[in-house]
Image: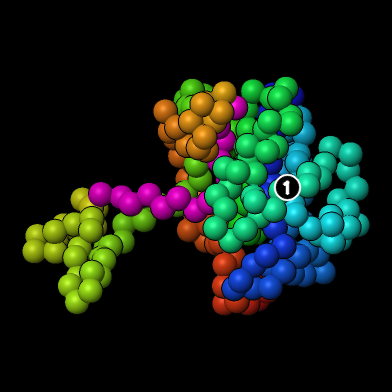
Amino acid sequence: MKNFLCIIPIRAGSSAIKNKNIKLINGKPLAYYAIKKAYESNVFGKIIVATDSQRYIKILKKFLPNKKIHFFNRSRKSATNKAKSEIVLNEVITKYENFQYICMIQVTSPFLSSRHIIEAKKKFLKSKFDSLFSCYISHEWLWKQDKNRLNSLNYNYKKRPQRQNFNKVIFENGALYFFKRNGFIKHKNRLFRKIGFYEMSKKDSLDINFPSDLNYLKKK
């Protein structure tokens, strides 16, 4: 447990849903739930909430008094709409050097549970992966539209296979990632070398990006 650092990035800027990460769900900010599940998993030696907003820190501290949860002031560069998460990951990892393994958790995945975190960690270690991402698996037919032309991506529509014989499609859901610290420093990416995946259900893979997602969550 002491070798695992959890990084939870949140930022104030959100174009589709203003202040998405602190929208109240059952009286608590959206970000609270992922942070709480990370703590309840008892997997991490330290949990870092990396944000660019002092207001967010003030709000979340009302709900997260535990000493294991720390707040980190991420840079403006790492908090723009186009900034990759690797920037803030690097900022935190550079400061906290005494951890061999890193987990990044996304607060917009409200159905992520402590069980998911525990099982993903076990698979990451048991299979000796260098990095791992969470996902859901589907047998859907995928198409892509290029201008006025439609192309089937993962099957030949002229020789449509039966569902049971159809190759599964793995959808990276962004809920969590595990990776080795040294590998991240070398590759500057959360995924590298021997990559594994941890399967979640499609329902649990909900990612809050649009108002319709938030409305769906509020009805649950």
Please, which colouring scheme is shown? rainbow
Answer with left or right where residue 147 lies relative to residue 4: left
Answer with left or right where residue 219 lies relative to residue 122: right
- Residue at the front extreme? 77
Q: Residue at x 26, y 66 (%)?
A: 144
* Residue matched to label 1: 74
Of 27 and 108, which appears nearest the observer?
Answer: 108
Quarter occupied by residue 53: bottom right
Q: Is residue 187 above or below residue 78?
A: above
Q: Can residue 19 be seen here?
A: yes
Q: Position of residue 160 (x, y in %)?
A: 14, 61
Region of the chain picked out in magenta, as a range: 167-181
Answer with left or right where residue 7 lies relative to residue 127: right
Of 136 and 142, which appears nearest the observer?
Answer: 142
Q: Can residue 37 be seen here?
A: no
Q: Is residue 161 magenta?
A: no
Secondary element under disc 1, as helix, strand or loop, is loop
- Residue at the left extreme? 158
The amino acid type of the residue labelled 1 equals Arg
Q: Main secondary structure of the magenta part?
A: strand
Q: Is residue 188 above or below residue 151?
A: above
Q: Position of residue 119 (x, y in %)?
A: 58, 37
Task: Bin the neighbour count of mark 1 within 10 Å (Cα to Cα): few under 14, some 14-19, many 20 and up.
Answer: many
For the C terminus, the quadrant is: bottom right
Q: Residue at x 70, y 58 (%)?
A: 11
Of 145 and 220, which appears nearest the observer?
Answer: 145
Answer with left or right where residue 28 lies relative to residue 67: left
Q: Position of residue 199 (x, y in %)?
A: 47, 45
Of 97 and 173, which appears nearest the observer?
Answer: 97
Q: Is residue 173 magenta?
A: yes
Q: Residue at x 28, y 62 (%)?
A: 142
Quarter occupied by residue 149: bottom left
